[in-house]
Amino acid sequence: MFDFILRNARIDGRDRPVDIGVREGSVAAIEGALPEGPPDRSAEGRFVCTGLVETHIHLDKAGILDRCPICEGTLKEAVTLTAAAKADFGEEDVYRRAESVLRQAIVNGTMVMRSFVETDPRVDLRSFDALLQLKRDYAASMDLDLCAFAQEGLTQEMATCDLLVSALEKGATSVGGCPYTDPDPVRHIALILDLAERFGVPADFHIDFDLDPENSDLPALIKAVEARGLQGRVSVGHATKLSAMRPDRFGELADRLAAAGIGVVVLPATDLYLNGRDADHLVPRGVTRAHFLAKKGVRTALATNNVLNPFTPYGDASLIRMANLYANVAQLGSDADLELAFAMISDGAAAVLGRERLSAPEVGQPADLLILDAENAIDAVRRIATPIAGYKRSVQTFERPLPSILGNVQTRSE
Ligand SMILES: [Zn+2]
């Protein structure tokens, strides 16, 4: 009756561990105890969820520290160094670097991912073609949403617009812009939203990436989204100006973002690394408080952004580590706030991408199952829990044995 049963799993919304019965790639039953017989595995009382959701990563420009000599550690330098390196990107080179990060994301429990991929005259469609091949090759392990992205501006380099169109025609599933690198941010926003409407895909903007509370591009974006009726189809990354605004202005923009259905993705690693470089004491965090936005009704997510490049010279594509980093920086302590941090890398993150995906396994849904070495979501974020095994549509995608202590240890704990 079942192809596989995952037994003794703790899931959200249930007081006691359950058995999860899987048939034809979907969850067919969730009960206290399912019959013996089918192939099975015990989660040994650990927390099981439907996998993690990466809303914002750049697979195409990951792993390029060897070609980018970082001196200042500023956003301007990161953009300049990466743009120069990009001209020499080859298709195989991009595939190899992106694959390495994708494989790390898989063993870290990520099952859905939006990757930006830059399509401009420096790189043409070489990065896009590489990631399209990667998407096909890893389709069984990852739902990969490729976002054709104008990192270097648009209105001053309209050839990028044609390349975005080519990428969308070839299979990009979202389109991204970066108003802060464009001399005309408002027109940049309009051009990207035009493409989103023309191809029926979501739009995602890198926006407001500094700590000056003035000159935000968010009001123009909110206005455009509402005028076009694109509520629920647009998200933004960084938005660190919000962290520099006084509470009344922050609250006002939060309400307007919520009303416009614009999702906000906070990128703690990059925002911490690049912001506040001009301070010589009391260096600001420069990380927008996503949990405050969430409490105002804004769809919010925490994400990786860059891995091993001038924007973020660190990284392992671990979303649980990122949620823990955010919790630490944003001073979260209560169970409720830690639970919210987990939501921002799971079901809340899915909502930012416009997907309905609950964190708890449900009958009738695809059997995407992640076993974490934790009691629950709160515990997972507090301890940066190790992902032990993952199943995508019921097929196992990774196994990660826990470490063992060796040697002649005397323990009294049993
Ligand atoms: Zn980014």
Image (spheres, rainbow, N blue to C red):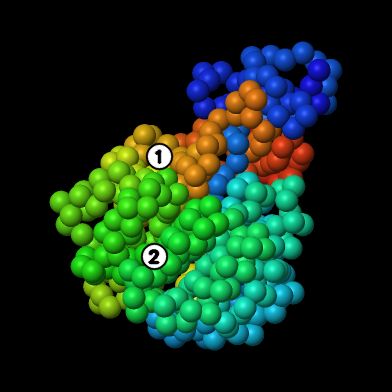
Determine whether, in the image, residue 305 is placed left or right of residue 101: left
Q: Position of residue 373 (x, y in %)?
A: 60, 38
Quarter of the image for the N terminus: give it.
top right
Q: Which residue is mark 2?
A: 190
Q: Position of residue 113 (x, y in %)?
A: 59, 52
Amino acid type at image mark 1:
Leu
The answer to whether 15 appears left or right of 87 in the picture is: left
Checking the image for residue 129, the label placed there is none
Q: Earlier in the sequence, mark 1 or mark 2?
A: 2
Q: Residue at x 74, y 32 (%)?
A: 25
Callout 2 crowding tier (Cα within 10 Å): few <14, some 14–19, many ≥20: some
**Horizontal side, residue 91 vs residue 411: left or right:** right
For the point 52% across and 73% down, which residue is it? 161
Most foreground residue, 26 or 346? 26
Residue at the spot 42% in from the left edge and 37% down from the top edge: 339
Q: Secondary structure at mark 2?
A: helix
Alpha-carbon distance for marks 1 and 2? 33 Å
Query: At x 72% / y 15%, what residue is drawn?
Result: 34
| Mark 1–mark 2 CB contact (< 8 Å) | no
* Residue 111 visible (yes or no): yes
Q: Secondary structure at mark 1?
A: helix
Q: Is residue 58 above or below residue 75?
A: above
The amino acid type, in three-letter code, at marker 2 is Ala
- Quadrant of the drawing holding the C terminus: top right
On the question of residue 268 being in view, the answer is no
Q: Residue 282 or 56: which is nearer the viewer?
A: 56
Q: Is mark 1 within 8 Å of ligand 1?
A: no
Where, by quadrant of the figure, is residue 409 drawn? top right
Residue 106: horizontal and vertical position, in percent?
A: 66, 51
In this figure, which residue is indicated by the disc labeled 1? 340
Task: Tell me the crowding category of disc 1: few under 14, some 14 to 19, or many 20 or more residues within 10 angstroms, Cα based.
Answer: many
For marks 1 and 2, give the one nearer the viewer.
2
